[in-house]
Image (spheres, rainbow, N blue to C red):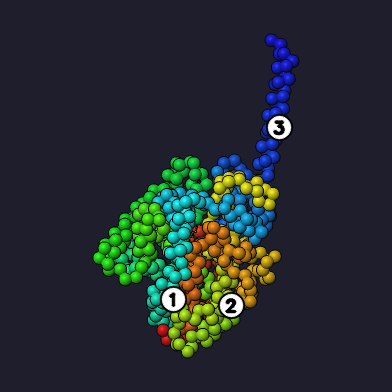
Amino acid sequence: MQMEPIAIYLFVSALFILVILKIKTTNSSSKLPPGLWKLPIIGNLHQLAAGGPLIHKVLRDIAKKHGPLVHLQLGHVSTILVSSPEIAKQVMKTHDIVFASRSQPLSAKIISYDSANIGFAPYGDYWRQMRKICVLDLLSTKRVQSFRSLREEEFSGLATLLASHAGSPVNLTQMLHATMLGFTSRAAFGKKYQNQEKFISILCELLKVGTGFNIADFYPSIKWLQDITGLRTKLEKLHLEVDSLLDEIIDDHIADDNNNTSMHEDLVDVLLRVQNDRNYEITRNNIKAVILDMFAAGTDTSATTIDWTMAEMLKNPSALKKAQEEVRRVFSEKGYVDESNFDELKYLRAVIKETLRLHPPAPLLLPRLSRERCVIDGYEIPQKTQVLVNAWTIGRDSRYWEDAECFIAERFLDSSIDFNGNNFEYIPFGAGRRMCPGMSFGLANVELPLALFLYHFDWKLPNGMKHEDLDMSEVYFGVTVRRELNMHVIPIVSKPV
Ligand code: HEM
C-alpha cells in the first residue's frame, strides 16, 4: 500500500517535533548543577561510599573538584550539595521559603510519630505552629533563664564528681554526655523518673540507629528495602518502648497537675498547658514527638561542643591559659561560678565560637527539601530536591578565613561575625526559617560547664601525652560528628568546688 504524500509529511513532522521535544528535555535536565558521572540505579552512592565514613570530607572533596553547587543522584533521591557561603545564602535567605521543607527519613516517620517533631516536620501549618511554640515558650530566653538554677545544680554536681577523681584520669566525654542527658531529663520532666535510665538508654540507641545515612532512605518508594535491612523492625521496637515510657511520664504530669503538686514548669508542663490553650491543636503524640526532639536535637550537639572545646583548649595551651585567667579573674571575688557574670567572659565565648567554626556538631546541618522549582546561580533545581549544606567546609573556606585550618580564638574577639544566621560563612546553627531554635538553650548549656571546668581545675593529659599529640579524629554519631576517641584527662583541683 502506497502512503499518501500528506501522510508522509505528517509522519515526518511528528518525528521532527518529537526530536525537538527530546532535545528540549535533555537541555532542561542539563541545566541541573554540574554533577559526577552516575551509575544506573545507585547514581552517585558508590562515589560517596568509596570516600569513607566522614561524609562531610568526601563532600568537601567533591566540591573542590566540581564547584560550590553540585548535583548528586543518591539512589532515587535527587540532591544538591551546597559548599560556599554565596550559594548557602541563596538557599537559606534569598529562596529560604522554597527550601524550608525537610526530607522525611524513615526514622522520623516511625520514631517521631509521622514526622510530628519540629526538626523533620514538612513545611506547613503544623510545623509553623510547633515552631512558634518553641520560639515563644519552650526555648525562649525566659525559659532558658528559668532553668538556670537547675543547670547550675547539675553541672556543679559534675564538677564535684570530677573533684572526687582529682589527680586520676577521667573519661570526660562520657561524664559530659551523661550529665547533659540528666540535665535535659530534669528540664523536660521536672524530676527523676524510676525509668529514667531506661529512657536514656533507649534514646541513645534510637539516636544511633535512627539518625544519619540509612540506605532505605535513598529508595523511599521501595518499601521492602526497609524490611530487609531490618531498619523498620528495629525502629518500631525502640519506638514502642520509648512511647510507653513517655505515656507514663505524661500521665504522671496530668495527675500532678490535678493535685496541684507541680512547683516549677518543666517542658512537659509547658506542652500540656499549650495543649489546653484553644489557639493550638496539639495531640498527645505531638507532645511526645516534640519532647523527643529536645533530646535528639539538644543533648548530643551541646555535649559534643563542650568536648571539642576542651580538646581544642588542651591542644592549644595558650588558649586554655587565657580562658582560664579570664574565668578566674571574673569570679575571683565571688569565689564560685554562676551565670550572672557570663557577659564578661569574652575570651571564652570567642573560644566556643572558634570551636563551632572548626567543628560544627552537625556538619551538614539537617537536609532540607525544595517545595517548588527554583533557579540558583543559573541552574535549575527541581521541586523535591534534597539540599545538603556543608557548613563544615564553609567554616574552613580560605577566602573568608585566614589560616582557616588553625584554631585562633582571637579572630572572634573584635569581630562582628556571629552564628545568628546572618553571616553565611559561619553557620553552625544553620540559617533562615529552619535555623536552630535551641541556640540560646544550647549555648547556656555549653558555657556553664566550661566556665566551671576552667575555674576549679587545671588539666593534664594522661600518660605524659603531649598537647600536640591529642588526637582530633572525627566519627559520626547519627548526624553529629564527635571526636573519635573519648577524652581521658586528669583534673587537678585548683579552687575547691
Ligand atoms: C551547640 C548546640 C546546638 C547546635 C550546634 C545546633 C545546631 C542545629 C542545626 C545545625 C540545626 C539545623 C538548622 C538548619 O537546618 O538550618 C538545628 C535544628 C534544630 N535544633 Fe539545634 N543545635 C544545638 C542545640 C539545640 C538545643 C539545645 C535544642 C533544643 C533543646 C535544639 C533544637 C533544635 C530543633 C528543634 C531544630 C529543628 C528546627 C526546625 O527544623 O525548624 N538545638 N540545630
Q: Please give the name of the residue rendered at 45% of the width and 61% of the height, measured from the top-left corner.
A: 134
Near mark 1 (Cα within 10 A), the count class, few <14, some 14-19 or many ≥20, is: some
Residue 205 falls left or right of residue 351: left
Q: Secondary structure at mark 1?
A: strand
* Residue placed under numbered mark 1 in the picture: 170
Residue 137 falls left or right of residue 362: left
Whole-percent x, y for residue 1 in the image:
69, 10
The answer to whether residue 223 is above or below residue 69 is above
Whole-percent x, y for residue 173 in the image:
46, 71
Q: CA distance from mark 2 to mark 3?
A: 63 Å
Q: Amino acid at mark 2?
A: Asn
The answer to whether residue 364 is above or below residue 310 is above
Say how many tags the image has: 3
Q: Which of pointers 1 and 3 indicates the residue nearer the eye?
A: 3
Looking at the image, tell me whether mark 1 or mark 3 is earlier in sequence order.
3
Q: Secondary structure at mark 3?
A: helix
Q: Amino acid at mark 1?
A: Val
* Residue placed under numbered mark 3 in the picture: 20
Quick one: quadrant of the C terminus? Answer: bottom left
Q: Please give the name of the residue rendered at 55% of the width and 75% of the height, measured from the top-left corner.
A: 349
Q: CA distance from mark 2 to mark 1?
A: 20 Å
Q: CA distance from mark 1 to mark 3?
A: 70 Å
Looking at the image, tell me whether mark 2 or mark 3 is earlier in sequence order.
3
Near mark 2 (Cα within 10 A), the count class, few <14, some 14-19 or many ≥20, is: some
Asked if one can make out residue 289 in the rendered structure from this viewpoint, the answer is no
Near mark 3 (Cα within 10 A), the count class, few <14, some 14-19 or many ≥20, is: few
Labelled disc at residue 316: 2
